[in-house]
Amino acid sequence: MNKTLRILQLIALSFLLSSFNNQKQETFNLTINVNELRNSTGVVVFALYDREAAFPDEHYKKYLKKLTGKIVNGSSTVTFENIPAGKYAVNILHDENKDGKIKRGLIMPKEGIGFSNYQSIGFSNRPSFQKASFDLLSDKKIVVKIIYM
């Protein structure tokens, strides 16, 4: 009798534990729009980051997810789908020559760049994950300003 009760308890415990493991984490969609591109040449690279150590990512190698958007009438929009709730930041490149890299002059970028929560960048306003990040707790739409130096 004790053995049967113990087996039933183990079966009930395994069902209980498996129900926790089968619960899917809620995910959301993040739509990002960029306007006022200086031309319709090339594409727009949208990179999504979820950790401070990866941002900013000048070479676009440490991102969580990356999408490329077409340019239509000086604008581009992409949607990252099924993103778990969390803290994220966005880095954008108007990749006019489609090489996946920031084209530079002597020091400053020649192509447009942008970061979530930034209207301008400079030596005293360098991008950081802390300033660029936002919470994703539901489906969200953001607009990122492209900055040309």
Image: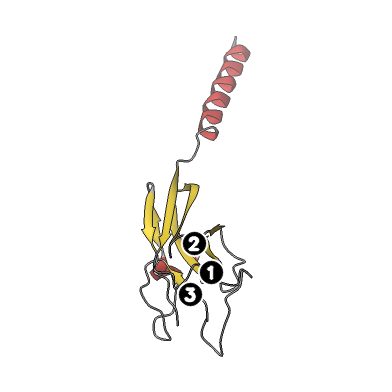
Front-lying residue, 3 or 11: 11
Q: Nearer the observer, disc 3 or disc 1?
A: 1
Q: Residue at x 60, y 9 (%)?
A: 1
Query: Pointer 2 and pointer 1: residues touching (CB < 8 Å)?
Result: yes
Q: Which residue is mark 2?
A: 71
How far is mark 2 from mark 3, CA to CA? 13 Å
Q: Residue at x 45, y 63 (%)?
A: 89
Dot 2 or dot 3, earlier in sequence = 2
**Label for residue 41?**
1
Q: Residue at x 37, y 54 (%)?
A: 141
How far is mark 3 from mark 1, CA to CA? 12 Å
Q: Quadrant of the C terminus?
A: bottom left
User: What is the three-letter code of the residue carrying label 2?
Assistant: Ile
Q: Nearer the observer, disc 2 or disc 3?
A: 2
96 up-or-down from 18: above or below? below
Q: Residue at x 44, y 75 (%)?
A: 127
Residue 103 location in percent, x, y?
58, 79
Coloured how? secondary structure
Q: Is residue 14 left or right of residue 86?
A: right
User: What is the three-letter code of the residue carrying label 1?
Assistant: Thr
Front-lying residue, 53 or 146: 146
Query: Splitting the image into 4 quarters, where does residue 22 fall?
Result: top right
**Label for residue 112?**
3
Dot 3 or dot 1, earlier in sequence = 1
